[in-house]
Amino acid sequence: MEILVTYLTRRQNGGVSRRSEERSAEAVHFGRSTNAEVYLPDPRIRFEHAVIHQRPGGLFIEVEKLSGVRVNGRLAQNTPVGLGDVISIGPFDVTLVELPDGKDIAIEVELVRPLGDDYAQLAARSTVRLVDHGLSRRRLAWIGFFAVLVFFLIMPIVFFSQYTPVPAKDTVGFRPDTVWDSGPISAPHRFISDQCNLCHQKPFVQVMDGACLSCHANTTHHFDAAKPEIAGIPDFRNLAARKCNSCHQEHNGNQAISVSQERFCTDCHGDIETTLPQAALKNAGSFDKDHPEFRPTVVANSANREFKRVSLDDTAALVERSGLKFPHELHLKKEGVRGPKGKETLDCNGCHQLTKGAANFDPIGMEATCERCHQLVFDPRRPDRTLPHGQANNAQMLIREFYSDYGLRGGINDVQDPAPAFERHRPGEQAPVTAQRQTNPLEWADQQAQRVADQSFGKTMCGNCHEVSYGKGKGPLNWAVVPATVTRDWLPLGRFDHSAHFDMLKCSECHAAQSSKKATDVLLPKIAVCKDCHGGEKASNKVPSTCITCHDFHLPGAPKMGAGMPAGNTPEGEAALSRNNMPIVGRN
C-alpha cells in the first residue's frame, strides 16, 4: 500500500515544522530499525515495536505483549484503528489523518515525551569506554603489535633457523612456525604435515622443485621439451618451464592438489593438429562437445606383438588380431551351454572378475577360468593325463613320450591297430602286443603321437580357441600356436574405473558381447555412451568431467621434471610407448 509519513517538530516560538516521506510497502512497521517505514529514534523503542496491516475489515495494529502501545489511551495488542485515532508508541504519538489523493494511509508522528534529566545522569554514571578503566586504545594497540611481532614472526624465524629435520616417519609435535600454516594439508601429504622443512627448505621462498623431486624423483613430464619440433613453440616451452607448485597447490584442505580446469589442457590440445601435426593427435576440447571419438589400441599382429590405434568410427580397420578364436555369442546363449555338470547359463561375471575396489578386471587365465569346461585331455582312455596350457612344444613332447612309453611297454590296446579276432589272455597277463608294435614300436609311437597332435592342435582343443599353424620344424610334431595377446586395456592413455560403474550399469549397456560372433570384435562403447551420463566441466545435469578425470598429465617415457635435469626420453619409456604405437610428445 502507499504510505505518507509526516514528522512534526514543535519549535520554541510555537511554530510547527513538517517533514514528509512517501513509502510503498505491504505493512507499516514502527521501530528503531532503519528499515522500518516509520523510523522512531529513541532507546525506549524496540527495533520493531509495532506494525499496521490492511485487512478486509480495515486497518489493524499488532504489537507484542508488554510493549506499552496504546490506542486512544487504551493498551492495544491486535486492535483496529481508523481516521483520527492516536497511537502512543513510547515517547511518540502517531495520528491517522485525512488521506491525500493516491494514498492508502497517512500518518503524523510527533515526539511528545522526550527523555528527561535522569537519562543524562545515568549516562554520566555509566562506564562504557576502555579509557574509563585506565586502558587506552593506543596502549592496547602497541601491546598487540609487539605480541604479534614476537609470537608470529620472531619465534617462528628463530625456530626455523635452528630446527634440525627429522625422518619423515617421526612425529615432530608442536612447532612455533605452524602459525604460518595457511590451511589444512591434503590427505596424501598429511603424514608429513608437521615437518614444514621437508617442503619449505628456505625461509620466505616458495617451495622449490627440488623439494618435490626429493620424494617424486620418478615423476615424468608431459612431453620432451628438448625435441626440435617442440622447442620452438612458445606454449609448449612455457608449459615445460612451469614449477611444480604452479599446478599443485597445497594447504587447501582434503581435496585434489592438481589443476583440474579444462583450459589447462585445451589451450594446447584444442588445436594440436595444427601446432604439432607430427604427434598424430586429434584436437580435443570440452568432453561433451569437442572430444574426438575413442581410438583404442588394438593388436595388429599377435605373433609379432604389433599394436595400432584405430578410431571406433573406422569399422573396417577396427579388428583385434589377438590370436584367439573366442566367440562371446556362443558362450552367452540364453539357453545355456554344456558344462561339467550339465547345461548352465553363463554371464559376464562368470569369466570377468572384478576385485572389490579395483579399477580393472582381473586377467583371464586358462587355469582359473576356462579349464573347468575345456580340459586338455588328449587320450580318453587316460583322463588323468592332460596337456600343459601355454606350452605348445612341451605339449607335443608329452604326447610323443606318452605313446613311446606305450609302444615299448605294450600298454592298452589301440583302436587303430588291427586286432585279432579273439584277444583272450589269463588274468594278470599283459595284453598281446600287435605285430607292428613288436617289430617297430618307435614307428608305431610316432604315428600315434602325430595322429593325436594333428587332432588336438588342428581340430580340437588348441585349434578351437587359438590360431594354429602346421609346418615342418614348427614344433616337435610340426605344430605351433600363435601367441595370444589379450588386451586388458584398450585405452592405455586413458583411465576408466569399472568399480565406480559396476553397481549402476549392466555390462551389456556398454559392451555388446551377446551379439559378438568373432574374437576380432572390439567391444568398446563409443564416446556417445559415456556422454549419456558425463558432461563437460560446467555440466549441471550430468557428471562434470574434465580432462584429468580420465587422463594423467605426467606421461611415462618423458624426461624427469625439475630444473637442471637432462632432457630426453628414457629408453624404457620410449619402448613402452612404441609398443602401443603411441606418440612420445603427447596424448589425447
Image: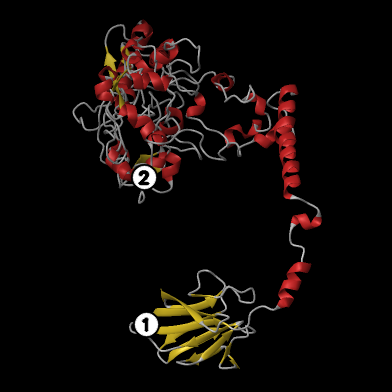
Residue in the foreground of this view, choosing between 414 and 216: 216
Q: Is residue 565 left or right of residue 309?
A: right
Instruction: Give the x, y percent position of residue 236.
Output: 36, 20
Question: Measuring 74% from the left and 27% from the top, which residue is drawn there?
Answer: 159
- Element carrying mark 2: loop
Q: Is residue 501 above or below residue 192?
A: below
Can you tell which mark lies on residue 538?
Answer: 2
State the separation of the CA atoms marked 2 and 1.
Answer: 50 Å
Residue in the foreground of this view, choosing between 201 and 491: 201
Instruction: Give the x, y percent position of residue 405.
Output: 44, 12
Bin the neighbour count of mark 1 within 10 Å (Cα to Cα): few under 14, some 14-19, many 20 and up: some
Quadrant of res 442: top left
Residue with the most extreme left position: 316
Question: Measuring 34% from the left and 10% from the top, which residue is drawn there?
Answer: 475
Amino acid type, residue under disc 2 in the picture? Lys
Q: Is residue 584 above or below residue 88?
A: above
Can I make out residue 545 in this image?
Answer: yes
Residue in the foreground of this view, choosing between 185 and 31: 31
Q: Is residue 304 above or below residue 253?
A: above
Residue with the most extreme front position: 13
Can you tell which mark lies on residue 82?
Answer: none
Residue that label 1 marks? 103
Instruction: Give the x, y percent position of residue 250.
Output: 56, 33
Residue in the foreground of this view, choosing between 553 and 146: 146
Quadrant of res 386: top left
Quadrant of res 310: top left
Q: Is residue 180 left or right of residue 87?
A: right
Quadrant holding the C terminus: top left
Q: Contact, CB < 8 Å: mark 2 with mark 1?
A: no
Amino acid type, residue under disc 1 in the picture? Lys
Quadrant holding the N terminus: bottom left
Bin the neighbour count of mark 2 within 10 Å (Cα to Cα): few under 14, some 14-19, many 20 and up: some
